[in-house]
Image (cartoon, rainbow, N blue to C red):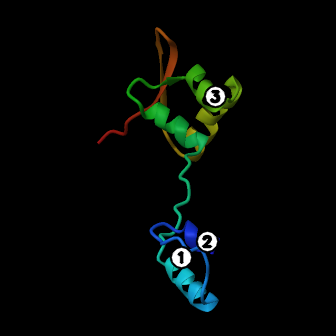
Amino acid sequence: MALWNGLPDSETLAEVADRETLLAQLWSAMESLPDPQPEQRRSKQAEVIALLHRPEGATVDEVMALTGWQRHTVRGVFSGALKKKLGLTIGSEREERGRVYRVAQAAP
């Protein structure tokens, strides 16, 4: 009965007259509920790629702040996972805020 009373848009019941009828109604109501959507969580690698796709790019320090990785890990991800495994072209420039990395846009 607690399950029935917890369903959205169901009338609250204080007692049950016929248990079998209640079970049938409960199953029917539960089957009509939408399937729960899994929580969409982006990986740290996907977050790093999103940072590098921004027009302003990202510094190693910004990636470290986002991911909690150490400096050598960030550089390793740039060269290993992003360049070698995914084939992304990572460019860098020296700017006021330090060395800024970006994913180079492919030529049309």
Mark 3, residues whose alpha carbon is within 10 Å: few (<14), some, or many (≥20)? some
Residue 69 drawn above or below residue 98 = below
Give the alpha-carbon distance from disc 1 to disc 2, as whole Å. Answer: 10 Å
Q: Nearer the viewer, residue 20 or 78?
A: 20
Answer yes or no: do the residues labelled 3 and 2 have beta carbons within 8 Å?
no
Residue 13 visible in this rendered orientation of the protein = yes
Residue 89 visible in this rendered orientation of the protein = no
Q: Kindly indicate the quadrant of the structure image that contains residue 43.
A: top right
Between marks 1 and 2 in the image, the one whose residue lies nearer the viewer: 2
The residue to which callout 2 is attached is 3
Q: At numbered mark 2, what does the secondary structure look like: helix, strand or loop?
A: helix
Give the alpha-carbon distance from disc 3 to disc 2, as whole Å. Answer: 52 Å
Q: Which of 24 and 89 is in front in this view?
A: 24
Give the alpha-carbon distance from disc 3 to disc 1, as whole Å. Answer: 50 Å
The residue to which callout 3 is attached is 75
The residue to which callout 1 is attached is 30
- Tag 3: residue type? Arg
Residue 79 drawn above or below residue 38 = above
Residue 18: x and y, percent? 60, 90
Answer yes or no: do the residues labelled 3 and 1 have beta carbons within 8 Å?
no
Answer yes or no: do the residues labelled 1 and 2 have beta carbons within 8 Å?
yes
Residue 46: x and y, percent? 54, 42
Mark 1, residues whose alpha carbon is within 10 Å: few (<14), some, or many (≥20)? some
Q: At numbered mark 1, what does the secondary structure look like: helix, strand or loop?
A: helix
Q: Which of 108 and 14 is in front in this view?
A: 14
Residue 71: x and y, percent? 68, 23
- Tag 1: residue type? Met
- Tag 2: residue type? Leu
